[in-house]
Image (tube, grey):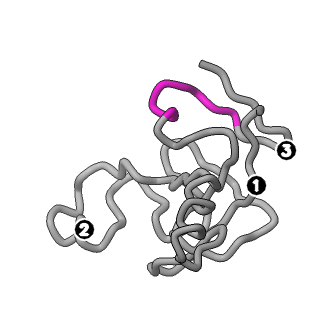
Amino acid sequence: MRPIVTAVACSPAHGFSKAVVPAIMLRKGQGVEGDAHMGVTVKHRSRVKADPTRPNLRQVHLIHGELHDELQLAGFNVAEGTMGENITTRGLTCWACRAARYCISAQTRWSR
């Protein structure tokens, strides 16, 4: 199965879930335009409290849809965006992301 993006989500406010939207704009070195976690420095409240000058290493949150499947089978009520992710994928585990470069567009491509 080729990796696909099944949903994108964004929220301007800090909270746990994000609303699924038709499209998001990714800004290099910033994250998802309009999202509460966008920016060069940390945005998670606990990290801001500890040191607001630290670099933001969590600008875009990805979760693989297969994780939603597993959690639903275990009885949890989860869906795209409910775990705070900006991008939900299928056929691509988030654990593989460190080793690959991705171009996310209308037709998602990926390369190692």
Mark with earlier residue (2, 1) = 1
* Foreground tag (3 vs 1): 1
Residue that extends furthest to the top in the rendered view of this protein: 112
Residue found 24% across the figure and 68% down from its top? 48
- Is residue 23 shown above or below 30? below
Near mark 2 (Cα within 10 A), the count class, few <14, some 14-19 or many ≥20, is: some
Residue found 55% across the figure and 52% down from its top? 62
Quadrant in the picture for the C terminus: top right
- Is residue 31 shown above or below 21? above
Front residue of this view, candidates 48 and 90: 90
Residue at numbered disc 1? 6
Q: Which residues are magenta?
A: 96-103
Residue 29, percent from left and from top: 49, 43
Q: Quadrant of residue 81?
A: bottom right
Residue at numbered disc 2? 48
Residue 44, percent from left and from top: 33, 68
Distance from label 2 to label 1 (Cα)?
31 Å
Q: Amino acid at mark 3?
A: Ala
Quadrant in the picture for the N terminus: top right
Kind of element beneath mark 1: strand
Residue at numbered disc 3? 106
Q: Which mark is residue 70?
A: none
Residue 89, percent from left and from top: 67, 49
Q: Quadrant of residue 91?
A: top right
Front residue of this view, candidates 38 and 11: 11
Kind of element beneath mark 2: helix
